[in-house]
Amino acid sequence: MDRLNKYLAHAGLGSRRYCEELILAGRVSIDGHTIKDLATRVGPEQDVKVDGEPIRAEKFVYWLVNKPRGYLCTNHDPAGRPLAIDLVPQISQRVYTVGRLDEDSEGLLLLTNDGDLAHRLMHPRFGVEKAYLVLVAGNPAPDDLKQLLQGVYLAEGHVKARQVKRLRRQGDSTWLRVVLAEGKNREIRRMLAKLEHKVLRLKRIEIGPLEIGSLGPGKSRPLTLAEIKRLKRLAERTNGPDEDLGA
C-alpha cells in the first residue's frame, strides 16, 4: 500500500506536496470517506476520488533516451528550446528525466514516473555510479588524473571521481572515461577546468547497470524487464537520506 499523497502524485495530479494540500483541504475521499490524514495509505482496489472524480494511479514506465546536444532536461522551457521528453512522444504518462545532463552534454537518460526509484538512482548518498566519455583539450598528465581521483574543491565542497582512465588521443585532445557517484551541476566540466583542461565533449554511457549500447542519438527505447529488475535490486541495496538532488 502507498501513502495517499504518493498515490495521487503517481496518478498525475501534481507533486506530492500539492497532493498533500488536496488531502488537507478535504478534497480526497477513499471508499466514500473524506480523508484529511496525510499518513493514510491506499491499496490498488480502493475507490479513490478527488472532488468526486475517480482516480487511478498511473502505470510505471521506464525509457532509455540518448539525448543529443542542444536538448534540455526539463519538462518546460519558456524559450521553446527542444526537450529530452520530446524524444518520447509515445509516452502518455508524465515522466521526468533521471540523471540530468546540461544542454551541451549528451548521452544516456532514464525517463520514468517512478519517483522513488529515480531518487535512489541519482542521490549521491546512494552511490550509484555513472560513466562518461569525456573529450578534453590537451593531454592531461598522470598527476592530473590522480588529482581527479583524490578530488578537487568546488563551491559545494570536495568532489572526486571514482575512476578515471585515459582512452586515446584525438588530434590535440584526449578522450577519458570518468566514473562518478555524485551528480552536482556540470561536475566533470568544473573539475577539469580546475586542472586547466577544457571539456570539448561529454557523453554519459552508463547509469548503474544501464548502458547506452547501440542506441543512436535522439533515439529511445523502453527498458527490458531484466533491466527494470536489475535497477530495482540496486535500489533495494541502497540506503540513504530522503533528500532531493539537483543534477
Image: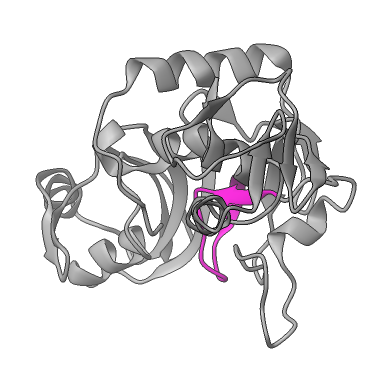
In the rendered image, the quadrant that contains the C terminus is: bottom left
Residue lying at 36% horizontally and 32% vertically, measured from the top left: 128
Is residue 109 at all visible to an observer of this figure?
A: yes
Closest to the observer: 205 or 116?
116
Residue lying at 56% horizontally and 52% vertically, measured from the top left: 19
Closest to the observer: 14 or 216?
14
> In the visual, does 142 lie left or right of 57?
left
In the rendered image, the quadrant that contains the N terminus is: top right
Above or below, 239 relative to 89: above
Residue placed furthest toward the front: 33
> In the visual, does 7 lie left or right of 242?
right
Image x and y of residue 162, in percent: 24, 36
Above or below, 77 relative to 41: below
Residue placed furthest toward the right: 90
Image x and y of residue 118, in percent: 50, 38
Is residue 110 at all visible to an observer of this figure?
A: no
Residue lying at 36% horizontally and 53% vertically, measured from the top left: 245
Q: Is residue 98 magenta?
A: yes
Colour logic: one colour
Residue lying at 12% horizontally and 58% vertically, measured from the top left: 152
Residue placed furthest toward the bottom: 79
> In the visual, does 136 lie left or right of 61?
left
Image x and y of residue 67, in percent: 67, 55
Numbered disc total: 0
Q: Is residue 206 magenta?
A: no
Image quadrant in which you'd find residue 46: top right
> In the visual, does 114 lie left or right of 17?
right
Q: Which residues lie in the magenta part?
A: 95-109
Image x and y of residue 140, in percent: 25, 57
